[in-house]
Image (cartoon, grey):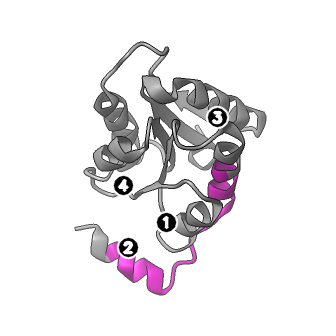
Amino acid sequence: MDKENAIIIGSDHAAFGLKEKIKDLLLSKGFQVEDAGTDNEDSVNYVDYGKKVATAVSTGRFSRGILLCGTGLGMSMVANRFPKVRAALCSDVFSARMSRVHNDANILVMGGRIIGDALAFELVLTWLASGFEGGRHLDRIKSIDL
C-alpha cells in the first residue's frame, strides 16, 4: 500500500450516505480507500468507527483519514484522544486548507448533517491538495504531541 495515496474513512449512520459519495470521489481520483464502516444507515455508536480510523492513523498504518458523523463534533473528540492524531473539524474551505498548512491535520472531520455533498467534496480535495508548511508551525505541532 502506498501510504501517501491511501486513506482510511469511517462514519456513523448519520453520515453514511456522504461517506459513500466521498469514497467514490477518492477512488475516482486514484486513491486507495479502506472503509472502516459503518456499512448502512442503521443506528450505531460513532465512537467505534472513530476509534478504528484514529487507531490506523495514530499507529502509522495510514498517514491520513477522514471521519464523518452528524455534526463532526463527536468524531473530532474521539480522534483527538489518540497520540499523533490531529483531527480537524472543517466546514469551510479556508479551514480545511489551513488545517493542513499550519496544523498538519492528519484526519479531516466533517458533519454530514451540516454540509452538503458539493462542499464536502471541495473540502476533501482542498485538504488533500494542501501541504504542511513546517517551519514555526512544526515547533507548535511538536508541543502538542507529548
**Vertical placement of residue 21 versus 115, above or below:** above
Disc 4, SS: loop
Taking the spot 47% from the left edge, 44% from the top edge, the residue there is 62
Which residue type does callout 3 highlight?
Answer: Ile
Find residue 89 and name its label. Answer: none
Disc 3, SS: helix
Which residue type does callout 4 highlight?
Answer: Val
Dot placed on the residue nearer the N-terminal end, 3 or 1: 3
Q: Which residue was labeled with disc 1? A: 104
Q: Which residue was labeled with disc 3? A: 22
Pick whichever, 118 or 48, lies toward us: 118
Q: In this view, does 2 lie to the left or right of 16?
A: right
The answer to if 139 sits in the magenta stretch is yes
**Vertical placement of residue 145 versus 66, above or below:** below
Pick whichever, 131 or 72, lies toward us: 72
Disc 1, SS: loop
Residue 44: percent from the left, percent from the top?
Answer: 34, 20
Q: In this view, does 122 lie to the left or right of 45?
A: right
Give the CA separation, mark 1 to mark 4: 10 Å
Q: Which residue was labeled with disc 4? A: 85
Q: Main secondary structure of the magenta part?
A: helix
What range is drawn magenta here?
A: 123-142
